[in-house]
Image (cartoon, rainbow, N blue to C red):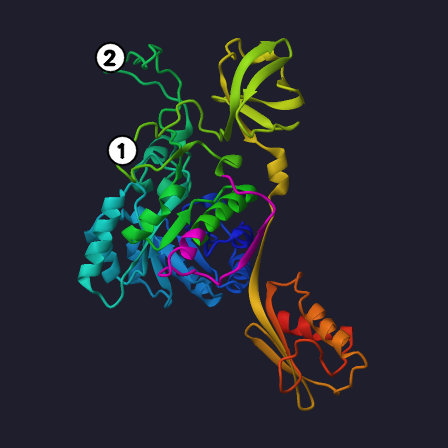
Amino acid sequence: MGIAAIQAGADAVYIGAPEFGARQAAGNSVENIAELVTYAHRFGVQVLVTLNTLLHDDEYHRACALAHELYKVGVDALIIQDLNLLKYDLPPIRLHASTQCDNRTPKQVLRLQELGFRRVVLARELSIEQIKDINDELLIQNSKFKIELEAFVHGALCVSYSGRCYLSEVLMDRSANRGCCAQLCRQRYDLLDKDGKEILDIHGEPIHQRYLLSLQDMDRSQHLAELIKAGVTTFKIEGRLKDRDYVTNIVAYYRKLIDQLIDNNPTLRHASTPSVYQYGFTPNPAKTFHRGQTDYFLHGRTPNMANWQTPKSIGEKIGKVIATRYNAICVELAHGITLHNGDGICYGDKGFAINRIEGDWIYPNVRVSDIGNRLIGQILYRNLDNEFLRSLHAERRIPVNICFEAIADGFRLTIGKNSAFFEAEHQLATNPERALQTIIQQLSKLGDTYFVAKDIQVFDGKLCCTNTFPYFIPTSQLNLWRRQLTNL
């Protein structure tokens, strides 16, 4: 998942350690994290490890030892919640304050800055104005360093404030603050009055067995410029326990939006090595796991934050049912929608797969009579688009300048920051034009590396060669030198 995020355009990835992470089912060995660090640092990408549960008294020494292991393998920062861990002998590593530290006031953020934290993950519930107030107070303090502000912009939402939920612990003896939330907010409930009677909704129907606590997913993609102006330096996508398709799609979506902001604002810069991306798809949040969207409290309390119909992915709206028959459904498709055999369709918490399509008629993998008699007028959504999933491929390359020079007793090759001298005979070329073309052609073959050629210059020892090169160099030799420089 970390590699998928990096390839799609992430400037940093956060990942769970073997233990003490707030997603107990998403732990990773130190060895695996070390591999991710090596891969990430090639692109200037940071690796942040979560040690963000509340710890028992007998766990602090083990957590501290784990922090030292992570520091030794090159992890860039630790995300922690339990401030008592600061009393122990931690390594000299950056510390980020988890959102579960209840980071919602200038006073709390200033306290964390004084304690030495370099970044604070803000409470999800803050508005733009509240974020700006925190940033303004930090600027007034004029500290030796200003703590960075990180804000969630996309992903699942917890119905409790800043994830400080005790429902799972009380009902199931599984503490969310220990990384083993039972996700009871995604279950059905009744809504009762003080006399135990079911309350009616606006349609006069009893609020019975509905997903009353299941929030829609956060999507602040249209408010990134506002967040930057308010002082946010890092956008966080909630992605643990999601699949590779989701990670690739959502990261690519935000990468494109952020690059547009950077291109239009000279005061902004990339947080990792500027890269070239190749996507085999057009990013679209509705095409992977998607519960609907809300910007949450960014501009004050907004309606329809929850989806009472289902806690599952609903995907994208495809159209409305206008007719049915025994084994098929006629759908008035929305503009631009093309369906495929095998696609998944849902309405509320029900759904089916498409067996085949004939014009506007969909033939489900279940009998129409088995999925209800009230389908006419029903809005349908597609939560599985097979063609889109097959196209989900992202590649990231670092653009580099390449310089090849003839010097005394050999040649010098420079690819990006890597440079080496190769001792070799200066053998005169019988076809100087072909000699130059061969050098440029072979040195540009970087497809199996992390690089892509931005510019290639060739010098004969004095001048830059534009049409000819005086020396012949075998293709095999050029390929060997190129591989030696790109495999460092």
Q: Position of residue 204 (x, y in %)?
A: 33, 10
Magenta range is 260-284
**Residue, disc 1:** 301
479 part of magenta stretch:
no
Circle nearer the N terminus (1, 2): 2
Expressed as whole percent of the image width and height from the top left, the position of residue 71 reads 44, 65
- Going by the image, does 381 lie left or right of 267? right
Prevalent SS, magenta region: loop
Residue 71 visible from this viewpoint:
yes
Crowding at mark 2 (Cα within 10 Å: few <14, some 14-19, many 20+) = few
Q: Residue at x 57, y 71 (%)?
A: 401
Q: Quadrant of the C terminus?
A: bottom right
Depth check: give the residue in front, 68 or 425. 425
For the residue marked with disc 1, what is the amino acid? Arg
Say if the magenta span includes residue 265: yes
Q: Give the crowd class for mark 1: few <14, some 14-19, many >=20 residues within 10 Å.
A: few
| Residue 146 x/y as whole percent | 27, 62
Which residue in the structure is indicated by mark 2? 195
